[in-house]
Image: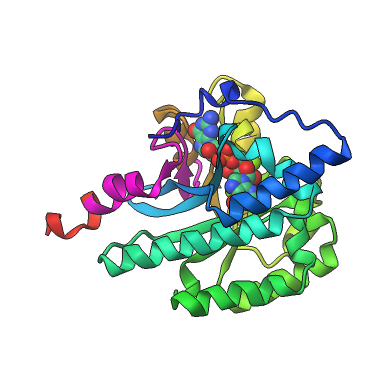
Amino acid sequence: QSKNDGKDRFNFYNIDYNKKAEDYLSLKQEIMQGLKNKEFEIYFQPQFDKFEYLYGSEVLVRWNHPDKGFLYPEKFIPYAIELGLIDKIDLYVFEEAVKTYKHWYEKGYNPGVLSWNVTMCQLQKNDFFSEIKEIINKYKINPGILNLEITEESIMKNPQISIKMLNLIKELGISISVDDFGTGYSSLAYLKKLPIDKIKIDQSFISDIPYNRDDVIITKAIINLGKNLDLKVVAEGVKTKIQRQFVIDKGCDFIQGEYYSMPIDKNHFEEKYLKVIYGSEQI
Ligand code: C2E
Ligand code: MG
Ligand code: MG
Ligand code: MG
């Protein structure tokens, strides 16, 4: 099993591509090759509602690099963005996740809502919409189970175009979350203009609850803001029972974090969360 407890991540081989052109060129080829060879792997992290019922999962990418080992997104996503390859990775992850969900449906499981991440450029790209639609049609998946996660930063790159794209996505029936909420630069005025359904409280606000007074106050304020704007609120990076209880008491709708599970591969996800809860073995 791959490491998924999050603690060992900094021991992995650190890609040290300094900004030399030939390093970038080779990284570009490695990523292209990696996509072709299916070196990118999808992991799922479960999300639960206040009744501790499985609400869905977030798909997160890892790179099983042939020489550099198991790489977390922070080690390659920034480079993929610079190289203009992030949209290829994101689309790959999306298709793999949809394929996996389809497979689960065929087995009679209900994995709930599927959240996936995209990074900036796509919202500015015209084919983004048609690429997503194509995958939905190919796998005949109900768009209502899909949730797109996008950071404030990505939206604010070009708010006008982003809003247009997000509206198109929403018309398909896909819901939209603002990821890492509270860490970006978006003005609250924009929040009203965006066609969003959910905000995800960044884990940096959750991690020191209940000990850090500021974090407690900020988290409460974000939950209230979300409620008052009729948005669902997700707490990310929940590690302890106290943290879970705190955000639930304040009105948070969904919980994601180590308290339940770190991201795990699809086989483990199926074993742990689908077979047990919905599997035919139980009936
Ligand atoms: P994110 O979308 O905010 O995802 C949540 C991150 O928090 C994940 O890290 C997850 O493993 C981690 N996390 C969740 N709960 C806990 C917890 O209780 N404790 C700890 N220590 N960590 C927790 P991960 O998988 O390393 O991903 C990091 C970021 O990389 C993601 O942040 C997202 O911005 C980006 N990312 C991951 N997969 C993709 C992808 O397919 N496409 C794009 N564009 N970005 C991705
Ligand atoms: Mg996310
Ligand atoms: Mg986040
Ligand atoms: Mg993040």
Residue drawn where x is 44% and y is 78% of the image? 140
- Percent across and percent down for residue 247 are 49, 39
* 170, 109: nearer the viewer: 109
Examine the rendered structure and indicate whether residue 5 appears above or below residue 119. above
State which quadrant residue 157 falls in.
bottom right
Task: Report the span colored magenta.
Answer: 250-275
Examine the rendered structure and indicate whether residue 254 appears above or below residue 112. above
Residue 233 part of the magenta segment: no
Examine the rendered structure and indicate whether residue 121 appears above or below residue 69. below
- Percent across and percent down for residue 86 are 70, 54
Position of 45 with respect to 74 (left or right) is left
Position of 38 with respect to 219 (left or right) is left
Q: Is residue 222 visible?
A: no
Position of 56 with respect to 159 (left or right) is left
- Percent across and percent down for residue 2 are 43, 34
Residue drawn where x is 49% and y is 78% of the image? 138
Quadrant of the frame with the N terminus: top left
